[in-house]
Structures are given as C-alpha cells and as structure tokens.
Image: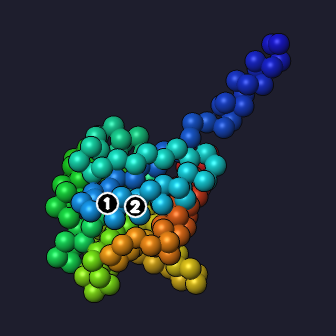
Amino acid sequence: MAKLLLWIAVSVCAWGAPVKVLIAVHSETGHTRALAEAARAGAAGVEGVEVVVKSSAEVKAEDVKGAAGILVGTPVHWQTMSGETKRLLDRMGGWLGKDFGEGKTGGVFCTSGTASNGADTTRMGVIAALLAMRFVVVGGVLEGGYGSLGAQAFGEVGEAAKQEARRYGARFARLTVRMHQK
C-alpha cells in the first residue's frame, strides 16, 4: 500500500497540473461563440490541457493570470475588434502588470458578415495588442497547410470554419503545452 501511495504521489508531481487555456469570446449573434466552441473542442483534445470558455465581459483577473494561453474571439466591427474585446485587452494589460503576458501564448479568431468586412485587420489589431503585452502569438493552419492569422468565419459558421477552428484550437494547445513543459 505504501508503494502504491508513493507511486501516486510521484506520478502527480511528474504529470503536474494541466496547462490552462482560456478562450475569451465576445459574441452577439452566436457565430463567434460557435467558433469558440469548435476551438475549445480542438484544444480539449490535447493531453494535459484544461480549457475554459468565458464571455469577454465575464473574464476576471485570476482567469487571465492563471492561463498559460489565451485565445481571443471577436466579431468584426467596422474593420476592427468589437468594443467589448478592446475593453478585455485593456483590462488584461492592467491585470498582468509590468511582466504582461511574458511566457504566455495568445491568439485570435473572428467572425464577420462577409469576406471583405475586415477579418484580417481585426485579427491584426488583436495580435498587435498581444505582442505589445509580450505574448507569444500562435497563428492557425488552413486545410491546405498554409498558415493563417487564426480561425475565421464569414456569415453562418459552417462545417469548414468549425474544422479550421478545431485545428487552430488543437495547434494552440499543443504549442502552449510545449512552452510550459519543464
């Protein structure tokens, strides 16, 4: 019995706590939330990862500080992120303090009405904020293997967009775990 308890204690120490990934999403129509759920499914399939999805307004300082990686989901508003997403990024900077996101991964996904509504400029705005906060930004991978700024959907979130978000969530989680392995 003592050997079993020792093995359990050593195993728990070796495995450590799961790497936490926070998906912070602002969704008005449900489209961005659908993409967030697909990204969550991809990330949750990675061993050693704990994924939490919260609306941007519900995210607290302890969520941000306790996460090894943060994926930000936003709808496109006039070629940029939503006001709620901007408020989240502003709060994150204050919560993280002078070290900001040092050692954390960050990424973004977005939804827009059409392909020409500014998905790229929206993602670049969030990426710029994450880089300024010293996050290591993780991009996505399209079906053909080409890199992307992160998952996206135009209009209704179809199966192809969900698959892209699942791939992105899984890639984000794998790289986050790799960064936090000791």
Q: Position of residue 177 (x, y in %)?
A: 57, 52
Q: Secondary structure at mark 1?
A: loop
Q: Which numbered marker is on residue 79? A: none
Q: Position of residue 179 (x, y in %)?
A: 55, 55
In depth, the one of 140 and 96 nearer the eye is: 140
Q: Is residue 72 visible?
A: no
Residue depicted at x 41% and y 63%: 35
Colour scheme of the picture: rainbow
Q: Secondary structure at mark 2?
A: helix
In depth, the one of 133 and 90 nearer the eye is: 90
Query: Which class describes the residues within 10 Å of circle 2: few (<14), some (14-19), or many (20+)?
Result: many
* Above/below status of 86 relative to 57: below
In depth, the one of 32 and 126 nearer the eye is: 32
- Label 2, on which residue? 34
Mark 1 and mark 2 in contact? Answer it, CB < 8 Å. Answer: yes
Task: Name the amino acid type tagged 2.
Answer: Ala
Q: Position of residue 128 (x, y in %)?
A: 29, 69
Q: Residue furthest bottom?
A: 116
Quarter of the image containing the N terminus?
A: top right
How far is mark 1 from mark 2, CA to CA? 6 Å
Q: Is residue 137 visible?
A: yes
Residue depicted at x 16% and y 76%: 78
Quarter of the image containing the C terminus?
A: top right
Residue depicted at x 35% and y 77%: 154
Q: Is residue 87 left or right of residue 62?
A: left
Q: Is residue 51 left or right of residue 96?
A: right
Q: Which corner quadrant of the image does residue 66 belong to?
A: top left
Q: Residue furthest top?
A: 1
Query: Which class describes the residues within 10 Å of circle 1: few (<14), some (14-19), or many (20+)?
Result: some
Residue depicted at x 48% and y 47%: 51
Task: Name the amino acid type tagged 1.
Answer: Gly
- Label 1, on which residue? 30
